[in-house]
Every structure is written in structure tokens, then in C-alpha cells.
């Protein structure tokens, strides 16, 4: 079968890929569509280190092909959205509503594939840039067969991560203000999640001017074009001054309640921290190299109680959040169709990467097998 394989230096389509049959708790899925998330590209360019050879893709949807004997919640023919949390269901974290903390969910790295006869790793427990994949049963969430899988596939990472970063990792609510760095597949979902929660101002920041339109369509009230010589922190502080004029010191005045780094750069995360109001929260969503550190001023924490928090795929509870998102989509509360800028055959994945780098895409979706 055909799949996109990372060999340690680059990625290429291979036609000599096989996947084993599912074990008792696993499901074999025929993948129909998969979004191209920046994290897949980060494996190829070495920002995210992953053992080769590996079958890429982690934001997919498809049709159940074979189920292991212990799997009862899905059956062959069911339409499913895949997600990356291969949680165990048994541990403290699974049983206190935090499957993203389940140690079993951390990538569940294994080698269900062979490439040219050599054992190959899965990626993010999912590997959906492959005509067939084998995942843990809990990673399959059954969806309405009427849903377009080439849209629903995006829920599996970008949508869950963006929406979950707001709904599950913050208390953002009516009247709050926020800044969102990076108007990509993840950032657009942060923007629309903040809008649903009633944020008063949502400021999108991107280095590509053309991103303003999508940002505003998804709910941004303002847009800042970042780039050389643009002091985004100063701009935000200009817009959100404090009315109390006698505050002195290095803490800045005013600021926003929340700031999300959906790019993955330490300097941006620090800017998020610097543009917060007292008590505000910066959320690290984008993923830089594993060695990256943040040069944060400690007084941001000690004197004005700002917080930096993280988001692992929006800390989602898949079997609750995915149906919740589908329902919100069907009720017109959140947009999914508009996230799909372009569909490409799997063979044209490099065109999709090129278009993503050119800033042309909210998301590019790869058609992996016939719907
Ligand atoms: N935490 C998680 O679980 C999780 C899940 C999914 C993706 N991610 C990460 O989130 C990040 C975004 O992913 P994506 O798929 O949305 O990527 P994307 O490529 O679709 O979007 C990134 C956006 O950031 C913009 N950008 C680049 N440099 C910038 C800068 N200096 N200032 C402002 N904007 C800038 C780009 O123009 C683009 O619009 C990546 O680092 C990805 O690995 C994290
Ligand atoms: Zn992703
Ligand atoms: Zn667990």
C-alpha cells in the first residue's frame, strides 16, 4: 500500500508499505483524508525528532476496516475521526478526566508498519498519511456518516488543539481579551473558540498579510502584521492601556487576558507573557525544538501573577470533545469547511507543503484513499 514515509532525512511516498493486522484492542482503518499539520513538517525538518523510518500523518479520518476482538464501540464500515491520544483508560489520569496526561497516550510509539520489509514506526500513534493504519480502538471516534470526512479529519489535531487550548486550558470568557500568534490551522481554531466563549477582542498576529482575511472570518477583531521592526507587544499595550497612571516598574501597563503562541517560537512565547495584563495567561501551543527555552522575567510571575501554561493537543478528552465539536459545527457555532483551503491527492503532498509555506492555506487536506 501507499504511505508518506520519513526516512531520517526526508519524506517520500512509498508503495511498499504494509501494516499488520490489529491486536485485540486495536482497529485497522482505511484512511480517506488527512490534514497536513505543521507538526508533520516539523518531523521532516528535524524540529520534532522522531525515529525513522516512520509513517507520517496524525490528523485523519476514515472507515473502520477490521476491529480487534475486544473493541465494541466501532464496527467495520463505521466512519471515524482519529485522534492521537492512545490512552489506557485505567490509570489515575484517565479516570480523572485527563487522558492527555496518560503515560500510555504519549505517542504510543510502536512499529505496526513495514517499509520495503523493514520495521517502521508510527507517528503520534496515528500515521494517517497511509492508505491503512492500525491504531488503538480508543483513538477512533465514530461520527455521523453524513459528515464529509475530508473536513472532519481536521478535528483530529488542529481543531482539537486550537479549540481545546481555549476551552480546556483557560477560563477565557465573556468580555475577555486575547492575542493569537499564528493564523494557521491551529491558530484559526483558537480564534473561533475564543469567539464562541464571548471574547471581546481577539487580536490575530501573523507574518503573512493575506492571513488577515481568514483571521477576521473566524472571529478576530484586529490583525497585526508582524515582521521586522514591528513591536507587537508595544502595539498591544497601546490598545490596552491601564487607566491607573501611577503604576511604575517594569511590569508594563494594561495588556490582554490571554495570549496564545500558535507558532512555536520562544521569543513569541515571551512576547505573549509580556503583553498580558496582571494575572493573565500565556498558552504555549506551537512546538519549537525540544531544546528551546524561554527567557522570561521572573517578576512577571512574582509581582503580577502572570502564568505560562501549555497545551498538549488541547488537553482533549476525545470521546467528549470530538462529539462536542461536531455538534457545535452542525449547529453553526464553529466553522470546519472554511478550514479546508485545498484538497490534494496524497501523491501531491509536496505541493501542499509548498502552499503551506507560501501562506496560502488554512489547512491543506490530502486525499489518501477514495471516500
Ligand atoms: N501543542 C500541540 O499539541 C500541537 C498540536 C498541533 C500543532 N502544534 C504546533 O502548533 C504550531 C502551528 O501549527 P499549524 O499547523 O497551525 O501551522 P501552520 O503552518 O498552519 O500555521 C503557522 C502560522 O504561523 C505564522 N507565523 C510564522 N512565523 C510567525 C511569526 N514569527 N509571527 C507570527 N506568525 C508567524 C505562519 O504564517 C502561519 O500562518 C506548530 O508549531 C505545530 O507543530 C502543536
Ligand atoms: Zn498536529
Ligand atoms: Zn491512562
Image: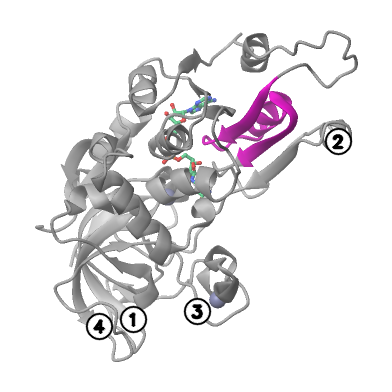
Residue under numbered circle 1: 26
Numbered label attached to residue 164: none
Marks 3 and 1, how far apart at CA: 14 Å
**Is residue 66 in view from this perspective?**
yes
In percent of width and height, residue 111 lies at: 40, 75
**Is residue 42 in view from this perspective?**
no
Numbered label attached to residue 67: 4
Residue under numbered circle 2: 298
Number of residues whose C-alpha sits closer than 10 Å to that of mark 1, classed few (under 14), some (14–19) or many (20 or more)? many
First in sequence, mark 2 or 1: give its number.
1
Q: Is disc 4 placed on a helix, strand or loop? A: strand
Q: Quadrant of the N terminus?
A: bottom left
User: What residue is shown at x 33% (from left), y 87% (from top)?
Assistant: 23
Numbered label attached to residue 89: 3
In the figure, is residue 264 to the left or right of 215? right
In percent of width and height, residue 165 lies at: 53, 45
User: What residue is shown at x 19% (from left), y 43% (from top)?
Assistant: 348
Amino acid at each position: 500500500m501507499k504511505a508518506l514515509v520519513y526516512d531520517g532525512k526526508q519524506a517520500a511516498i512509498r508503495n511498499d508499505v504494509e501494516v499488520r493486522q490489529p491486536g485485540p484492542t486495536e482497529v485497522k482503518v482505511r484512511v480517506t483524508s488527512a490534514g497536513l499539520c505543521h507538526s508533520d513538517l516539523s518531523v521532516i525538518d528535524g524540529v520534532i525528532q522522531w525515529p525513522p523510518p516512520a509513517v507520517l500523518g496524525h490528523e485523519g479520518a476514515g472507515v473502520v476496516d477490521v476491529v480487534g476482538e475486544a473493541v465494541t464501540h466501532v464496527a467495520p464500515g463505521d466512519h471515524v475521526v482519529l485522534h492521537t491520544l492512545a490512552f489506557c483508560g485505567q490509570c489515575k489520569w484517565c479516570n480523572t478526566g485527563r487522558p492527555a496526561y496518560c503515560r500510555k497516550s504519549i505517542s504510543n510509539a510502536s512499529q505496526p508498519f513495514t517499509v520495503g520489509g523493514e520495521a517502521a514506526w508510527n507517528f503520534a500513534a496515528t500515521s494517517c498519511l497511509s492508505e491503512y493504519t492500525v491504531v488503538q480502538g480508543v483513538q477512533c471516534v465514530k461520527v455521523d456518516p453524513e459528515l464529509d470526512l475530508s473536513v472532519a479529519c481536521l478535528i483530529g489535531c488542529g481543531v482539537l488543539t486550537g479549540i481545546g487550548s481555549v476551552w480546556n486550558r483557560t477560563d477565557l470568557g465573556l468580555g475577555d481579551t486575547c492575542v493569537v500568534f499564528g493564523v494557521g490551522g491551529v491558530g484559526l481554531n483558537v480564534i473561533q473558540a475564543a469567539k464562541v466563549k464571548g471574547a471581546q477582542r481577539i487580536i490575530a498576529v501573523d507574518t503573512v498579510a493575506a492571513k488577515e482575511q481568514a483571521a477576521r472570518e473566524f472571529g478576530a477583531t484586529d490583525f497585526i502584521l508582524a515582521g521586522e521592526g514591528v513591536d507587537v507587544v508595544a502595539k498591544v499595550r497601546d490598545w490596552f492601556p491601564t487607566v491607573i497612571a501611577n503604576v511604575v516598574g517594569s511590569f508594563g501597563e494594561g495588556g490582554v487576558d490571554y495570549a496564545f503562541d500558535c507558532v512555536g517560537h520562544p521569543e513569541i512565547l515571551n512576547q505573549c507573557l509580556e503583553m498580558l495584563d496582571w494575572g493573565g495567561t500565556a498558552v504555549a501551543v506551537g512546538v519549537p525544538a525540544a531544546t528551546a527555552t524561554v527567557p522570561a522575567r521572573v517578576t512577571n510571575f512574582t509581582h503580577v501573577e502572570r502564568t505560562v501554561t501549555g497545551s498538549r493537543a488541547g488537553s482533549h478528552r476525545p470521546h467528549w470533545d470530538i462529539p462536542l465539536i461536531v455538534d457545535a459545527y452542525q449547529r453553526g457555532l464553529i466553522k470546519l469547511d472554511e478550514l479546508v483551503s485545498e484538497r490534494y491527492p496524497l501523491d501531491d503532498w509536496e505541493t501542499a507543503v509548498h502552499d503551506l509555506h507560501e501562506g496560502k492555506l488554512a489547512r491543506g487536506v490530502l486525499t489518501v484513499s477514495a471516500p
